[in-house]
Image (cartoon, coloured by chain):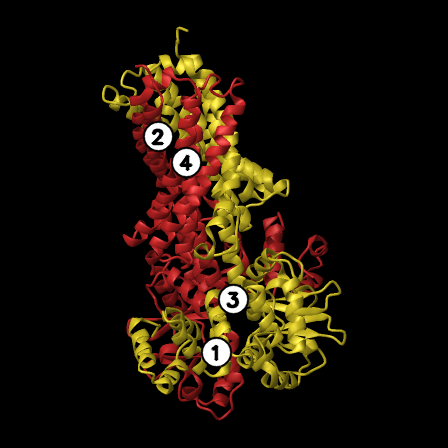
Chain colours: A yellow, B red
Amino acid sequence: MEFDENLFWELFELLRDNKLKELKEELVEINYADIAEFIMLIEDEKAAVKVFRIMPKNISAEVFAYLDSDWQQVIIQSISDKEIAGLMDELFLDDAVDFLEEVPANVVRRVLANTDKETRDTINRFLEYPDNCAGSVMTVEMVELHDRLNVKEAIAHIRATGVDKETIYTCYCIDDSRHLVGTLPLRRLLLSNEDMKIKDIMLDDEMVVSVQALDDQEEVAALAKKYDLLSVPVVDKENRLVGIITIDDIVDIIEEEATEDFEKMASLTPSDDEYLKTGVLSLAKNRIPWLIVLLVTSTFTGYIIDGFENKLAVVAGLTACIPMLMGTGGNSGSQVSTLIIRGLALGEIRTRDYLKVLWKEIRVSLIVGVVLALVNALRMILLRGTFLGSDATNNVVLVVSLAILCVVVVAKVMGCTLPIVAKLLKLDPAMMTGPMISTVVDAVSLLIYFSLANAIIDFGV
Amino acid sequence: MEFDENLFWELFELLRDNKLKELKEELVEINYADIAEFIMLIEDEKAAVKVFRIMPKNISAEVFAYLDSDWQQVIIQSISDKEIAGLMDELFLDDAVDFLEEVPANVVRRVLANTDKETRDTINRFLEYPDNCAGSVMTVEMVELHDRLNVKEAIAHIRATGVDKETIYTCYCIDDSRHLVGTLPLRRLLLSNEDMKIKDIMLDDEMVVSVQALDDQEEVAALAKKYDLLSVPVVDKENRLVGIITIDDIVDIIEEEATEDFEKMASLTPSDDEYLKTGVLSLAKNRIPWLIVLLVTSTFTGYIIDGFENKLAVVAGLTACIPMLMGTGGNSGSQVSTLIIRGLALGEIRTRDYLKVLWKEIRVSLIVGVVLALVNALRMILLRGTFLGSDATNNVVLVVSLAILCVVVVAKVMGCTLPIVAKLLKLDPAMMTGPMISTVVDAVSLLIYFSLANAIIDFGV
């Protein structure tokens, strides 16, 4: 049922044998996303463009929206000005804007030159919205219903105009000045009596959820999730309807935001571009800043070790355990910080829950710390005489195991505290905590380790 | 327009003054999600239950679905058997199943005892589906259209039955044996001529996308995203329609899957439960396994240091740089592995892209490595005489800087290789790479470091 290899080869053979009429008949029977996949799998660009051109205009525009931007550019550079004009006419505005945001300026100019003035002005306005704001992802193809209409008139209006709209499943009700005064799910409209007035069946007042064009797109995703919306209306400062954001774009926003958090927590400068489409220099640029910061801050860890180097040298096994201890601390810390950062992002944890979280982490870390300390003691005793710190005394085993317990507790406490503090300071918890947690925990782990060693071991120096 | 503090206090005062009629009038004017929020913000459980009971049955069922499971339990334990029966009658089946999955067995028994036999049987069947499969998240309240109907009959059918359906925006077309033979967006139905037959306007054959009840929920999310679907049909092995999964649940799946990847990469056993609702013991249980694995594997790192300990002791500054070097390696590696794991999860990178990725990473890592090596040399030279390896020789600076360059390259190559190898072996890239990358890179970093030191520095031992 889905697009598979068999279907690909069937279509490909028709193309190879130049049976374009049969190919076209096959293509109109499959999903737009699958046609796009077929086109992108054809290695030969000319043949791919041929497939694009044989499709009816309305289908080819839909397919175009599913193509990667590289392929969109290939197509645009191979078709005539007239075909571009036809394509732009059929494309939904948000898809057109998405495409234009990714291509070089000369392509944008050629495309806009072949677009009617009204669309061109709208597109230009959209291209000016800052990235990641509601305005930059909205579309203007929504169903607007005047609140004076009745149900029968509204349905007739949708039947007459709906084919050009990105969604008809939620209609937006406006008054004479285009103020957004209500929303009306098509379902509610369809199940209502034909003589009812829109004004009387629409969801109004407290029920209308909207965003402003300059609001962050994260806000849009949060509202759509909270209220289970299929589209979110966008208004200007005077509450006039300017566009809508549909669920397919909202799903993209949710994934983008998660990707950004992944990147921040891995010490990367977040980027909207797909990995394979990002150049080597940009990739390097996204990675270097945090690595330098972390390298420089690790000077402090070095300093701590340096101050203790003489003592490390006289007692076997102490140095060998440093990486293990720092690793355990770092892992323990990032386990918690990840849970807290994700919980904050999903709204499952709020800053006011801090004391609850802290109390939980203290208990969890004591359990985890004791288990790890015991495992470590066992490990060191079993391996004594073989290779790990082969002449490590019982005191060294005690110091390392105690240090593990303390480090786990401290790392967990810091791991839950840092993201919440960042959030309270209106900083980004993922950006602030992801990279820093391990450096901070590293330094603290060493201080704990050496203090315990000083207290328990007789260094004789 | 949205639920805010003012509205909360307004409602709360009505509740406090026991003006229940006015309160009810206010409540029916706001969104279900907001009513649920209001109820959960009332500290007094009895008062909260009172609010729940004054709402009309159809609204209270919708609100119930938005409550946290703790609150759902509070409500269920405070209302009569008859009220439970009414609630279960109004609840959408997937919401009822979600709720029952979270509450203790005695509550489940009481609820099911107050449900009619047919619903009870369906719910029991749903509760048996394994977690995370399509069957466990689907609903059975979908619009089924017989393919013999015409448009007018179909619309009449929807108007008659639609109010009980979870969505009416995609209708599913079945033949006499309930086989799924096509799908029909309501939009297409509404914009079609009244006399057309469903059979002739439905999307059929290659256009029908469906999953089987035991398929992984990730599959559902991937299809919904690829084809921009508002719901995905679920069929049994004979292609008979058994349910649908709606976009609100698909959004939840997408977030759940991202959360799982976050957890795996932070060395946690993934869990479906919200942090604040997970007990201390479960949290500890999710964290201990990987920490033990990592602690035990770090024995090898310890062994490497141990074998070099005598030499470390005679040259100042070498030991102090170990944490920095391991940190840089770990961070460089996880930067790449995160990008690759996320790219694989979103389908932006495929295993066949490996050589492209590898070639890219080699170039990126050379740039990043050279920059970091220079920054490090500068840092060590500037700090010489103050505290970092205060008598470190030029040779030590050279060894550490060269080591950084090599470690960055090796870490980046491993960071892009491990997730792709995991994927090729049909293992989970996030689970396999997240925790292991730093341990593997740690060990390799130390080997490189000590080999360079041996080659360049004269230890005189």
* Figure check: A410 above or below B54: above
Res A100 → quadrant: bottom right
Which residue is identified by label 1?
A60
Residue B446: numbered disc: 2
Residue A85 visible? The answer is: yes
Q: Secondary structure at mark 1?
A: helix
State how far apart marks 1 and 3 are (Cα). Answer: 19 Å
Which residue is identified by label 4?
B405
Horizontal side, residue B121 vs residue B384: left or right: left
- The kind of residue on which mark 4 rests is Leu
Chain where mark 1 sits:
A
Which residue is at 47% across, 73% downward? A75
* Figure check: A345 above or below B267: below
Chain where mark 4 sits:
B
Residue at the bottom extreme of this rendering: B195
- The kind of residue on which mark 2 rests is Leu
Given this view, does label 1 or label 4 mark the residue nearer the observer?
4
User: Are labels 2 and 3 on one chain?
Assistant: no
In-front residue for pair B322/B288: B322
Q: Are marks 2 and 3 in contact (CB under 8 Å)?
A: no
User: Are labels 2 and 4 on one chain?
Assistant: yes
Which residue is at 30% across, 14% downward? B461
Residue B458: numbered disc: none
Which residue is identified by label 3?
A248
Residue A191 visible? The answer is: no
Q: Position of residue A306 (x, y in %)?
A: 46, 19
State how far apart marks 2 and 4 are (Cα). Answer: 13 Å
Q: Are marks 1 and 3 in contact (CB under 8 Å)?
A: no
State how far apart marks 2 and 3 are (Cα). Answer: 48 Å
Chain where mark 3 sits:
A
